[in-house]
Amino acid sequence: MDRYNSREIEPKWQKRWEESEIFKTDVDLSKPKYYVLEMFPYPSGRIHMGHVRNYTMGDVVARYKSAQGFNVLHPMGWDAFGMPAENAAMENKVHPGDWTYQNIHDMREQLKPLGLSIDWGREFATCDPEYYGHQQSMFIDMLEAGLVYRKNATVNWDPIDLTVLANEQVENGLGWRSGAVVERKELTQWFFKISRYSEDLLVSIDKLNNWPDKVRLMQKNWIGKSKGLEIDFELQNAPSKYTKLKVYTTRPDTIFGMSFAGISADHPLASELAKEDKELAEFINICRKTATTEEALETTEKIGYATPIRVVNPLDKTKTYPLYVANFILMGYGTGAIFGCPAHDQRDLDFAQKYNLKIIPVVCPPDINENSFKVEKDAYTGPGHIINSEFLNGLSVNEAKVLISKTLQEKGLGLEKTNYRLRDWGISRQRYWGCPIPVIHCPKCGTIPEKKKNLPIVLPHDVNFDQPGNPLNRHKDWLNITCSECGGKAKRETDTMDTFVDSSWYFARFTSPKANTPTLKNEIDYWMNVDQYIGGVEHAILHLLYSRFFARAMQETGHMPKKAIEPFDALFTQGMVCHETYRDQGGNWLLPNEVKEEKKSKTKRYFVNLKNNSPVEVGPSIKMSKSKKNVVDPTDIIEQFGADTARWFMMSDSPPERDVEWTTAGVEAAWRHLQKVWRISFKIYSEGLTENNKKEEKIALNGEINHDKLLRDTHKSIDNVTKCLENFSFNKAIAHLYELTNAISNSKAKILTRQYSIKILAQLMQPVTPHLSQEIWSLYGSPSFISSEPWPQPITNLIEDEDLTYPVQVNGKKRAEIVVPVDLDAEAIETKVLLLPQIKNFLNGSKPKKIIIVRGRIVNVVI
RNA sequence: GCCCGCUUGGUGGAAUUGGUAGACACAAGGGACUUAAAAUCCCUCGACCUAACAGUCGUGCCGGUUCGAGUCCGGCAGCGGGCACCA
């Protein structure tokens, strides 16, 4: 019984927890609630160490908060739609649904041995018709609220696979699967009107105080607000419809430095001109092609096509400028047209130099003579005073902005305008394995939403993937329907939704996963918001921004309480799990369990291939990935060491927001430590049983000091560990748990004190090592579940010491230490310090210039 | 290119936010126990100098503020992350 066998003990307790339903949660108004959520996984089929880290963190929080007396909601589900299922269908002839549900089953089986305190009763997958049916119903509500619309948009189109590709599926301009040259194609697509909330999404970021600054900044940049002016320019020599050109600028103060104007290749005026101008049409084509290829993006030269049109300066009609169609102007931003001021914009400068356009500096940097100021290679974008600009001369940049803006607006030539980089969210995917968009195309009634009573629109199961394209387009029975409005012949929409839609509201559905409506008022009112959300930083922008949008849209359509408009109160982004890499002499990657460490010196380590003893090159530790083979399977680790060891190791050493390096030595150390905790627990337990007077007497002779010290150490540990868990400093919490273990192990305190300390240790470890803690708890005769026990409270006067040790510095360097009673006043400390022999030595009889005493911290003698 | 972050022993990291740099752990070395191995326990462990006590240097580099700087300020370098021509 002196060895802890995780293989027996962990499943034993997991079974009891499940039978007792201790992790089942319901609304309980008598208790404060706490909703902890980890980003739900994609069911790839295997869990990986990243999952272990993510879900362990969440579980530590859940178990800790639960012990603190909160009613904790800690659910789990599956982000189950998406392309890998379709790829598997094409490769292995399995149905995407069968493949997905099999994977969910497999992953659940791998996840359960981790001993997570999850309410599995709330589990769902986003590909369950019950789930996506409600999503369809909300889509209809949002359509009616004007939050959904259709428009033409360009997509990456793979002409071989007949499918739309996401940007990341385009590699060097080629489709990642087919290798075909990707085309840009205009399709009518569905959009969510996220831009309705641009301003609110931006300003509300400031309220997200418990989000990482990094994520908040990324979201701000993504939304990309800019204030500027729309200016109307008169055109000369333009087609009759186009007498004016609307241009957007954030630098109206530089208008007198203008030397050309430019429009996007997608600008209507460009298309109009191209009708009569073959060369221009060709140029526009080139612009469209180069825009998608990656190498082009990196090296793209700014190119333009000079039109015969002249643009007139609105403030000085004698000045006119050439109008170019240029590849660096985006139709999707501002008005798709700019005026070019080469001296103060790098892009414009590059362009001007290529086409020999004038470079007129109009902002002179401070402390530089305006007559000698020239712009050559670098555009000047800093502050300064205005020059060469008629009535603006002498003003600062900001003053000039205000004046020019006022002047142009008074003349009716300008309009102040705020623009956002954030564009509406295109959700159409021409794919099978996603949530069908619940819309009907009827020749008579037009494009109309499906009736809610007909929901869910379920994906047909009898599809095959042996032809390219979306199988929904070929599924006649599913496609051809009668219009639910007029009863005539109609067709279903075959686009499905972006899978980011599925993950934009799952956190809300967890509050009432079985409800007949997307959410239930009582439940969602009680459980929202998510108090702690935990996941990877790779979702910093899209997923989190879309979820924030959805919370607003759901609130507007009555599915979300107003208080949950920002659904995630606190966000934590955890680092990745890394492992060093191994390659044989042929350069092939090797798995960690295909190599062995041969010898070790202080600085260098040597590995060989297990198969043939040939030397192996050790590479840097990078994120675990199958392609580099630097992966360790959690299931193997649990089998070998147990879940508690994996959990303990994951939480120790590295701060949770940083990457952690998985090492065999580290896991083994964790395992040894847990064995030690068990061994000490068992020893102290047995000692208690065999306790006899003699022994007790002998221990007592060692003095009350030890006894007191362990009690103090124990309560200091309670205090420290609690603070660390509150701050997400799991690695530091574990350091304190090591300290407490060592203190107990070395202590000669009375048996009752040590037993008391062991039980506290088990409780403090419980969030991380629930099985071991539970086993100790039960060994010590407690019939309860340790996870249901209240969190230990530190006794204040036990964590405060009676004496304080002050380091004593001379001129800022530590030279001595002095132990004094806590409440000793400064004067007395000073007297004592000056009597210290080390200090006397330094003073050499003279008087110190100054003595600085910082209460509870330090003494510094200045000589 | 622009924006953001990081840089502490052989290694992961700690340092109460301006107050003893290196907690806790890993690795390494030495010892005890053992016929032996495993397991366990004990000791050493930033560099230099020293028999030892002591001392000197030390938080990427250079400079500054301060009684006192890993922490604040200015400059530089290296590494990592985000964005993609957003006018």
Image: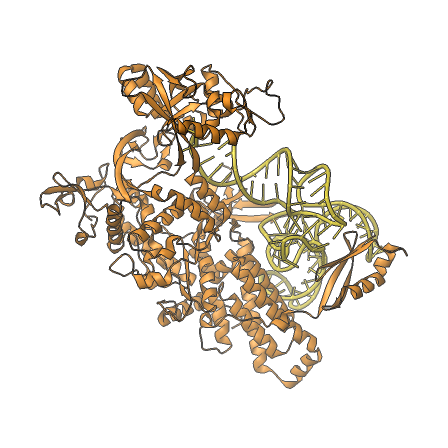
| Picture colour scheme | by chain
Query: Residue shown at 62%/21% (left/top)?
Result: A369
Looking at the image, residue A805 sits to the left or right of residue A519; the answer is right
A133 sits left or right of A504 in the view: left
Q: Residue at x 46, y 27 (%)?
A: A404
Residue A347: x and y, percent? 46, 25
- Residue A688 is situated, as x and y percent measured from the top left of the image, at 58, 80
Q: Position of residue B13 (x, y in %)?
A: 59, 52
Q: Residue furthest bottom?
A: A693
The tally of labels here is 0
**A2 sits to left or right of A159:** right
The answer to whether residue A585 of the structure is visible from this angle is yes
- Indicate the chain coloured orange by its letter: A
Q: Please say whether residue A77 is visible from this viewpoint.
A: no
Report the residue that reaches farthest toward the right.
A845
Which residue lies at the image location 84% right of the left edge and 61% below the top edge? A834
Position of residue A145 relative to residue A77, above or below, is: above
- Of the pair A745 and A29, the residue shown nearer to us: A29
Q: Colour of chain B?
A: yellow
Seen in the image, is A752 located left or right of residue A257? right
For the residue pair A614 and A115, the one nearer the viewer reads as: A115
